[in-house]
Amino acid sequence: MNDRIYVLDSTLRDGGYCNNWRFGQENIKRIISGLIDSNVDVIECGMLSEGFFSADESKYSSIHDATEILPKKKDKKLFVLLMNYGDYDVDKLPEYENGGMNGIRVAFHKKDMVQALEAAKKIKEKNYKVFLQPMVTATYSVDEYIDLLKSANEIDPYAFYIVDSFGSMSTNEVRKYCSLATHILKSNIILGFHSHNNLQLAFSNSQSFVEEAKGRKIIVDSCIMGMGRGAGNLNTELFLDFMNSMQEGEYKVTPLLVIIDEILNLFYEKKYWGYSLPNYLSATYNMHPNYATYLADKNTLTISMMGELLSLVD
């Protein structure tokens, strides 16, 4: 693990929006093994949520079920799950057990901030590493963001994130939120960045984040082949290559190329992810990509008509 910059791969969680989390049990295990072999630092194994899920899905209704997919040889990696606030009762969460899932990422909307932070406290009390993920971070005004950072300091999570949910953040915005966090967040709290690629800025924004946060421990999220909702995410294989070129790690890209060739290409053929005009429009209007996807799937609207409709959404 790099001393300052950690890479978190989110393929099995964010990539699940492309295939309804139906990777297949053996593929899930192969992806985790490939990520371990590549020396990725943190592996997000899927979603923690209420419900009934098969072994072929990277969604889990219990920590026990998620732990079952982990290999015996873990190479000191961190294994985490993401919980959307409101989708899982944290009172059901057992105490952390060594050898299982190490951390929980708590994703929340601004309207749920107070309750989500309370849930994060409970999770931390059960000895998990807690990651705070304020979705659509750019919707927080400077004053609201400062208040959020101060609240995060009180919880003292393992990590706090800047989340570009809509893939609409400019480089200047990334630097602004990063600078605020760097100056206000307690020094022991790792600062993370989760990008989306609607404007094709995931890679450059991640590089800017690394530069802006010099002197602080950080986490950069990515997905193999950029697999993720809408326009997708930062490509893990590209970012690992960048890290190697900067002499910031000793990552191996080949295991991920094998995963792309033998597993992910099959999903890509069935469900495209990546840059498209609808995804571009959703980012320019700073809205959830599902709006654009819904309109595009109708196959009855021109791009001009789609843009006009999106401009009317409040």
Image: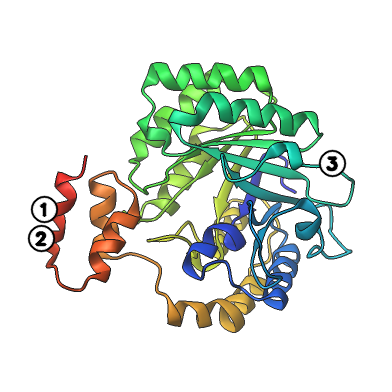
Give percent across and percent down for residue 64: 81, 55
Q: SS at mark 3?
A: loop
Pointer 2 residue:
305
Q: Residue at x 47, y 68 (%)?
A: 18
- Disc 1 residue type (three-letter): Glu
Residue 137, by quadrant, is top left
- Of the pair 147 and 94, the residue shown nearer to us: 94
Residue tagged 1: 308
- In the foreground, 309 or 233: 309
Q: Position of residue 206 (x, y in %)?
A: 48, 46
Mark 2: which amino acid?
A: Met
Quarter of image, res 32: bottom right
Residue at left offset 41%, top offset 39% = 136
Task: Look at the image and name its color scheme.
Answer: rainbow
The numbered mark at residue 96 is 3
Tell whether label 2 touches label 1 (CB within 8 Å): yes
